[in-house]
Amino acid sequence: MNDDGDCERRGTPPGKPDFDQLWKVLAPHVRAAVSRHRSRDVALAADDLLQEVRIRVWTVYSGDKNFRLKTSYYYKVVNSAIIDSLRSHRGTLAHSVRTETDGEEDEPALIERIGGEEQGPDQVFDEQHRQARLLKAIRQLPADRRRAVTLFLQGFTVPEIAELLGCDRNRAHNLAYRGVRALKDLMGDAG
Amino acid sequence: MFRAVTRDAGHCPPAGSLADLAAGRTWPWQRRRLVEHLSQCSDCSDDYHVLVTARGGLVTALEEQGHAGEGLTGGWLRPGLVAAAALGVVALSISVLVQSDAPAPVSGHGVLFASEFEHGPGGAERQPGQDRLFISDFGETEGEGGKLFRDDFGG
């Protein structure tokens, strides 16, 4: 069967790609990105997220009768759907972990595991003290370095920092490197 | 440790804003504001990482699906460029109109009329000889030889 006949049968205007075909090429990229960055998040099943994104894209696709929407619009729809889905799943991690471990682990082992993870009051105090020192040291950095360092600490790479700050990679590298060094000095002085 | 502190910073930007940032479709001041938030919010940073990772594949896949040749950047820049060009043409036209409204250069034959500097209703109806200020003697047959200018006020 040729493409036109297939399109007519499915009610798709000629020239407009079939939705299944469109989704077939989009889904692997969404799944790969989610799996890479959110694999630790047990609550976030990639299949659930994909399904939500698919519904959003389908809603836009079905309303696009003449296939006039641009690539950039579809791209924005996919991205917005991903973010919304990630945000909606956030915060359900604890419940999911408890559900998955129930029945698979005996009670003493579970108590021991939970007890082992819990910090004592002195550890909590030390941790809070270190956090406060770190934040204070970061606030002392010049604005450019502070931005580069905080992005670096958030896990962004130098090319990503350069893109976000709108500068070249050398400058981003220098800002991050010198910022981290200054941060170490400040933390050392404060400690 | 830093990420633990900055988790759930609150007041997160809408999903569309992060999507625009990932697509490079933000104004510089918007980008500064979003980047500032990303540096302070681990949750949004994680979400943004997902978008950046998926970006290359998604754009290529979308462009191959019937939008060949319509790049993401081109689609965004084209209306902007057209608007900027139109604004430029309008600004140029206005400046030309303003220039043409200025006093015209001295008319020919070396005669300077006062009415050329007046924009009253009678300015266009020039009476020969009534408002003549100076007459050039360069190449003029009228006038006395040796005098460069002669005024009509007895000078």
Image: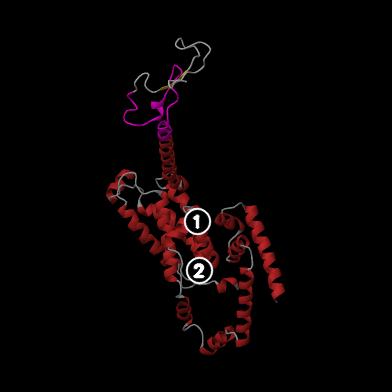
Q: Identify the residue at image location x=47%, y=84%.
A: A103
Decide which of tag 1 and tag 2 comes sooner along the chain. Answer: 1
Apparent side of residue A129 relative to residue A15 in the rendered image (left or right): right
Q: Name the chief secondary structure element in magenta.
A: loop
Give the chain letter at badge 2.
Answer: B
Q: Which residue is mark 2?
A: B43
The disc placed on residue B29 is 1
Which residues, given as a range, are shown in magenta? B96-125
Q: Nearer the viewer, residue A183 or A56?
A: A183
User: Residue A66, image x and y in percent?
Assistant: 31, 47
Residue A157, placed above or below residue B144: below
Residue A41, placed above or below residue A69: below
- Specify the quadrant that holds the N terminus of chain B: bottom right
Residue B92, placed above or below residue B53: above
Q: Nearer the viewer, residue A191 or A119?
A: A191
Q: Residues within 10 Å of mark 1 (few under 14, many from 20)?
A: few
Q: Three-letter amino acid code at disc 1? A: Trp
Q: Secondary structure at mark 2?
A: helix
User: Residue A155, image x and y in percent?
Assistant: 58, 64
Q: Nearer the viewer, residue B38 or B33?
A: B33
User: Residue B97, image x and y in percent?
Assistant: 40, 34
Q: Identify the residue at image location x=40%, y=55%.
A: A23
Q: How far is the residue under mark 1 from the one under mark 2?
A: 22 Å
Q: Identify the residue at image location x=46%, y=51%.
A: B59
User: Residue B92, image x and y in percent?
Assistant: 44, 36
Q: Nearer the viewer, residue A6 or B73?
A: B73
Give the chain letter at badge 1.
Answer: B
